[in-house]
Image (tube, rainbow, N blue to C red):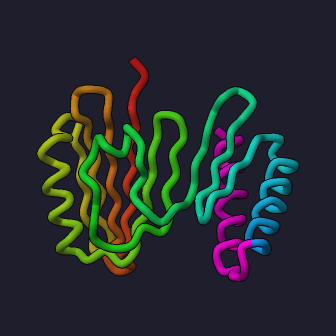
Amino acid sequence: MKRILACLLVCSCLLAVILPLGGCGIKKKAEQAISEKIVEKALGDKVDIKGDTVTVKGEDGEEITVGGGKWPDTDLAKKIPEFKKGKIATSATVDNNLMVFMEEVKADDFEAYLKEIKKTYTQDVYESRTDNMVTFGGNDGNQITVALNFMIKEGSMGISVEKKDE
């Protein structure tokens, strides 16, 4: 778990440095290659950077993907409806776990999404509401658990999906 968190931290920092950089194709490729080598040296893993997406592949076959700014295209992401409002700040996929962090989310859009999620994720449900945050969690009875966290004042939302091993 510490290794995963370290990978996510390094990848997030790397994205924060790389994304603002502009320039010609040669400069971008050089920056990408250098960045990959730095992360590979730091983590001892294989790193692939494509645009604003960073994928780290460990020696044990574990794979972590961070970034992209778009809805993940994985089997796990297809287990929940795509949230098409707001702006995707980052997403991460690790094994049977998926996390998407959204910004610029309006309360009405969150509530509509929550209503949609509640149609499928009806077991082991919990929901909490405060002046600052709405939290929901539940599972579908078929190994998929979803959690939503909406920060009202910030207009940000976290979506987590986990597939339990059989």
The reply, left or right, for residue 89 in relation to residue 85 is right
- The x, y position of residue 70, in whole percent, is 43, 62
Give the farthest residue toward the right.
41
The residue stretch that appears in magenta: 1-25
- The x, y position of residue 136, in whole percent, is 27, 52
- Choose top left, top right, bottom left or bottom right for residue 130: bottom left
Name the residue rendered at 36%, 70% in the picture: 151
Query: Does residue 13 belong to the magenta stretch?
Result: yes
Query: Does residue 32 belong to the magenta stretch?
Result: no
The reply, left or right, for residue 16 in relation to residue 34 is left
Q: Is residue 159 above or below residue 125?
A: below
Instruction: Identify the image quadrant of the N terminus.
Output: top right
Name the residue rendered at 69%, 82% in the picture: 22
Q: Observer-nearest residue: 27 or 63?
A: 27
**Number of numbered discs on residues:** 0
Name the residue rendered at 16%, 48% in the picture: 118
The reply, left or right, for residue 107 in relation to residue 40 is left
